[in-house]
Amino acid sequence: MAVSSPGQTLSELQNKAKRFRVEIIEMLAEAGSGHPGGSLSAIDFLTVLYFGGHLRHDPKRPDDPERDRFLLSKGHCVPALYCVLANAGYFPKAELKTLRKFGSRLQGHPDKRRLPFIEANTGSLGQGLSIALGLALAAKLDRAAWKTVCMTGDGEVQEGQIWEAAMAAPKYKLDNLIWVVDYNQVQQEGLTKAQMDLAPLQDKLEAFNWQVAEIDGHNFEAIDSALRAARQATGKPQAIILRTVKGKGVSWMELQPAWHGKAPKPEEAAKAIAELNS
Amino acid sequence: MASATSGATRDAFGARLAELGAEEPRLVVLDADLGGSTRTVAFMKRFPERHFELGIAEQNLIGAAAGLAMAGKIPVATSFACFLAGRLEVIRVAVAYNRTNVKLVGTHAGIGIGDDGPSQMGLEDVAAMRALSGMTVLQPADAVETRQAVDWMLRHQGPVYLRLTRQNVPELHPADYAFRFGKLDPIWKPASPPPKYQASILASGAVVANAVEAAKALERRGFMAQVLNAHTLKPFDADGILAAAGSSSRLVTVEDHYETGGLGSAVAEALADRGCPAPLVRLAVRDFAESGGTEELYEKYGLSANHIAEACLRNLD
């Protein structure tokens, strides 16, 4: 299967991500609730993944068995995923404004019962990596070429189930599994390092026998080459730790736990959009 | 017990699973270091490439099964009933909410496991699984029924929880028995069935044998009771319960499970939903139990044939 969009240039991707940030703020302001911080930290990666030619997918054939799978384990950041999927052509962009509203297909957390091209219903943190592991096992069993990419948060890595999956993937040499940690340093009630520090995460995952790349998660070139390398690697499951900033792009949201799970009011949204467009 | 043993229902499950591996290429089996006890070893030996040992990590076991199902496999994930039910939140999201075609098999059901004691006794699993939208819950009573329940489970598209025994149980069904999903199984009647039974005993799993033993003893005393085997605990056969309530003076439920949320609850709910008042005696486990032999524990905790007969005769006024 061909990728839906041939890899766009890095500056094109940067412009896209800038526009997507505005759309995320607009969606959340319209919804009146939701999670801006982790959506803004993840959007650069998602933009490169979906529009940089790193995910084999076709919005016209969302059930193609040979497609790559992307699972957003940090389901509360689904505004970022909705934004990317709408812009990729999976559903009309006008629908973004229905986020979290009664009757909408855009539930507060991913729901494939309403949007069948969502790979997995998530929202209970720590579960997505195990599901991704199962998908990767199935692809290996079938000797299929498709990859599974799973994004977790950093706070999410505190869940015990993550480490169960982290132990299992190297046992089965799942080099078709790419685990992306959006290490945005902030979780709901405070800084990750204060709530329950993960550091040194790279060392921990390497000790679990993953191949790990730790990169600047807002550097498009770094994301591009890390994804390229992870897709080509063999023998070990691949982890990409994205050093990111929660709320990235809106200065007064950045690294502020208060903006984990609170939507901007209309005047705040206008201020945020003005800064993003400046 | 007069009937010949049929082994434990886990034995019949393991044997059938290994046979079905040859017929169903999508079948995969996942274990959490208990494959010897859940009897998946035979499958593992025949189909090692389709068996995944995930270590003592049941959350990941269940999540990985969900992922395999999303890719078109038919995963069977096994552990003790108590350990699966303990991961309810993963089952809730990865299996039930995602509507994955995952088959969860919980062995070592109830106090009947005996010696290992309360921490290993699955007593809340039926309640937990019944609480999940879209989940089917099956509990066969013997080997003949287990084999057919396994066949049905693998044909069914959707999540299933299958509850099995550690201990041996008597063979209650004839070889030509036909498992009818969702229907109460009229497993035993007196030689001359009366127009109206004095009691209908509803039982599920290992204690169906105790119920049959009780009904036979009652028959010898001229007390007419029938036994209905509730192999399908969800969805529950409300029509069957209504019919039983209409054709008997009382209902008695027997289950090796905690008193809340299992068979007795399902019967009470079905009666209430249909506005059908009926005398109901519920025999179930009412506390964490203890180590001991199966028969000793069933006697002490109120699930033996003696207790079932007493519940049929007890003055309810």
Image (spheres, rainbow, N blue to C red):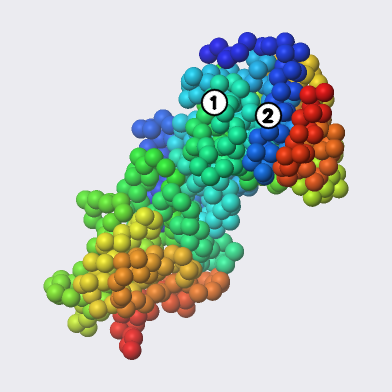
Question: Which label was assigned to residue A23?
Answer: 2
Q: In which quadrant will I find the C terminus of chain A?
A: top right
Q: Residue at x 54, y 66 (%)?
A: B115
Question: Nearest the camera: A149 or A175?
Answer: A149
Chain for disc number 1: A
Chain for disc number 2: A
> What's under tag 2, amino acid-wise?
Glu
Left or right side of A94 for A237? right
Task: Name the secondary structure under disc 2.
Answer: helix
Can you say whether B122 is above or below A6 in the image?
A: below
The picture quadrant where one finds residue B137 is bottom left
Q: Which residue is drawn at 54% across and 26% down?
A: A92
Q: How far apart are marks 2 and 1 (CA)?
A: 13 Å
Residue A171 position, x and y percent, is 65, 33
Can you say whether B290 is above or below A210 in the image?
A: below
Q: Which residue is drawn at 53% across and 18% down?
A: A58
Can you say whether A236 is above or below A199 in the image?
A: above
The picture quadrant where one finds residue B152 is top left
Give the number of callouts.
2
Name the residue beneath numbered marker 1.
Answer: A92
Residue A236 position, x and y percent, is 69, 25
Q: Is residue B198 visible?
A: yes
Task: Classify mark 2: residues with Cα within 10 Å, few (<14), some (14-19) or many (20+).
Answer: many
Can you say whether A43 is above or below A161 in the image?
A: above
> What's under tag 1, amino acid-wise?
Pro
Task: Classify mark 1: residues with Cα within 10 Å, few (<14), some (14-19) or many (20+).
Answer: few
